Image (cartoon, rainbow, N blue to C red):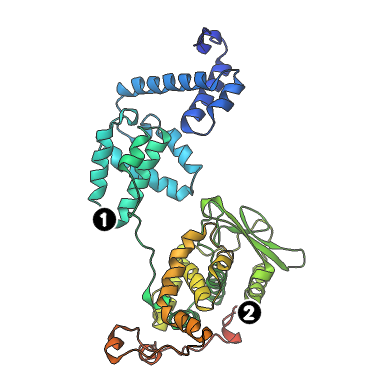
Amino acid sequence: MSGRRDIFELHATDPEFLERFRKTIADVRSGKLPAAVAGAAFNMSAKSIMRYAGRQKQADIDTATYVTVSSWKQVSGVAEWETWMKGRQKLNAAVRMSAIAAELWEKVWQKKPLQLLTEQDIIEAKLYIKGLSAGKRFKHTLALRALLRFGFGDQKWLTKHLSTKGLKTAPRMPAELKTAEGIQRAVNGLFLGLEQLQLDPSERVEADVIFTSKLALWARTGDVKEEREIFGSRINAGHSHLDIDSTGRLISWEFFSKWREVWIVPRAMMPAKLVSALESFVRSRDLKTGDFLFRMKAARAREILKAACAKAGILELQLHDFRKMGLSACVHSGVPLEVAVDFGVGWKDINTARKHYLMLKNANATAEYAKMSRFLGLGETAQPAASENSALPQTQDAQQSRAPAVEQSPRSDANSTDTPAQ
């Protein structure tokens, strides 16, 4: 290498140095460390570092060729790939991704060493994925792309064979949640249904606070182990934390979120009733610094949500629907998208929210056009012809004819989170 002796020969008697060098080369190969930075640490050029990386890759291939393994966890390079994955996304997502990769390795590649993957192997995997359900195609393609991005194969195959365009299925958006009336009916019905469930009073209050928090702040359900969002929140500690001062006054709520984003929601950006409910909840549970805010499991919250919806006779909601209802409420109340994305646990990338926002805007196109018509002094828009009625959404009267048996009045103070249900 440029007239210099091989580094492994020069430091043959220094195992600690060689181990450090091997780990550095591994970081370069996985993309964690730029070759130039690694080279500077060992007084070498980036080109020399890349040569050593190439040699190590070939050594791995030679080793893997003659080693037969029957378990995915034993495959050469898998442990490093999984570590790399966990550093780039949520733990649960990384685990699912590894399970998908193991499926491809066993069913498509017949347990072939990953270092020996060819372009034909990628094509066969793509054909296998094509035969899966629409919901699985996107995730399987992402797992396959992750293997290539880590170094198991040629990077050129990513654009040549593994485009994700058009694979991701549209997010769930029930028709009932696309209208202002539908959202209000769902919200009122949910909390009225919750009041009518035969629950322990303490559990009912906790569910009420959880649902209200999600509705007002758009936070995702989260994860206890990773301390993410709602169920991963602690008191004054951890990645996600509800900040309470020494007097019991709520200061803010910080959420450790998807893609390692951090969202801080100050007291002033929360409804007064939610602030009061959270302060009362922390005080009544005698929660201390480090305690998890909620003891209820996410699975139990889903059960209660389903039961409350059934009791009220409304659409069966999912926990993630609260996030969609929050953005939908912004549309119907006239909040601009560029402002809405910063509310609660919003969206760093405005394009992520734009599809949902514009979908609802388009649903209200007639009302929006009427605003413009009035502004120009042209008056109201014309009423639809009789032949068009069948294609229009149902009127409010028609919707009310399908309303649940439970009275759909707005939540009163007695039913708010300020006053625990009895």
In percent of the image, x 49 and y 33: which residue is there?
Answer: 31
Going by the numbered disc 2, the residue's amino acid type is Asp
Residue 226 percent coordinates (x, y): 54, 51
Going by the numbered disc 1, the residue's amino acid type is Ser
Residue 394 percent coordinates (x, y): 35, 86
- The image quadrant of residue 229 is bottom right
Q: Residues within 10 Å of mark 2 (few under 14, many from 20)?
A: many
Where is mark 2, residue-wise? Answer: 418
- Residue 107 in sight from this viewpoint: no
Q: Is residue 32 left or right of residue 405?
A: right
Q: Is residue 194 above or below residue 224?
A: below
Q: Which of 332 and 410 is in front in this view?
A: 332
Q: Is mark 2 on a helix, strand or loop?
A: loop
Q: Is residue 138 left or right of residue 422?
A: left
Residue 13 percent coordinates (x, y): 56, 9
Q: Is residue 161 left or right of residue 191?
A: left
Q: In this view, does 255 lie to the left or right of 360?
A: right
Q: Is mark 1 on a helix, strand or loop?
A: loop
Mark number, residue 133: 1
Mark number, residue 279: none
- The image quadrant of residue 45 is top right
- Residue 243 in sight from this viewpoint: yes
Q: Nearer the viewer, residue 165 or 124?
A: 165
Q: Which of 360 and 329 is in front in this view?
A: 360
Between discs 2 and 1, the one toward the N terminus: 1
